[in-house]
Amino acid sequence: LSSSSLSLLNGEKQAGRCGLKNEGSICYMNSALQCLSNIPQLTDYFLKWINNSNKNIANVYADLIKTMWSSQQRTLSPKNLMLTVSDHVPEFFNYRQQDAQEFMNILLDLLHSDLQTKDNGATTIIEQLFHWKIQSAVSYESCNKEDVTTDSVTFLPF
């Protein structure tokens, strides 16, 4: 067995190996959070996050990531994040099963909105990692013209 496997068997705590409590059928949310927390660029960004303004979603998500990756706890409750997101999307949190992909997209949209600057000149980490553009062209042979459209896409298939 590898040393990391042995340390897990011995019950040693390791950074990033933190379970999320399923409080009220939120396993869909926990799945999405575990996926996002294992994207190195995203996690590194929020591990270095310093609250220099009152960005609610970003601060709560950063606190969760910092706790998950601190090696201090084996399990933790994502309830603060759940309550913060539910302030923006109340119908999503009715203690019933929901769609993990839908939650992930909602969270990414909220984080993106929260991280945008007033000048809107800089891209956010969310945009850098999860947004892309699709360009389509329609050619008209009769008039030798082409219409080109560009759409922004955010979609994370599981």
Image (tube, helix red, strand yellow):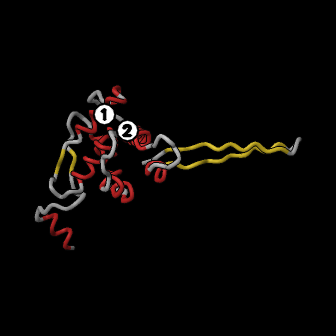
Asked which quadrant contains residue 60, the reply is: top left
Residue position marked by numbered label 2 in the rendering: 103
Give residue 72's position: percent from left, percent from top.
15, 56
The amino acid at mark 1 is Gln
Closest to the observer, 113 or 132: 113
* Residue 151 horizontal side relative to residue 52, left or right: right
Residue at 20 percent across and 69 percent down: it is 4
Residue at 88 percent across and 41 percent down: it is 143
The amino acid at mark 2 is Phe
Give residue 107's position: percent from left, percent from top.
38, 40
Q: State which tag comes first along the sequence, 2 or 1.
A: 1
Q: Pointer 2 and pointer 1: residues touching (CB < 8 Å)? A: no
Give residue 114's position: percent from left, percent from top.
40, 40
Q: Is residue 55 above or below residue 70?
A: above
The label number, if any, that marks residue 97 in the structure image: 1
Of circles 2 and 1, which is in front?
2
Give residue 6's position: percent from left, percent from top.
16, 69
Instruction: Give the alpha-carbon distance from disc 2 to disc 1, as whole Å.
Output: 11 Å
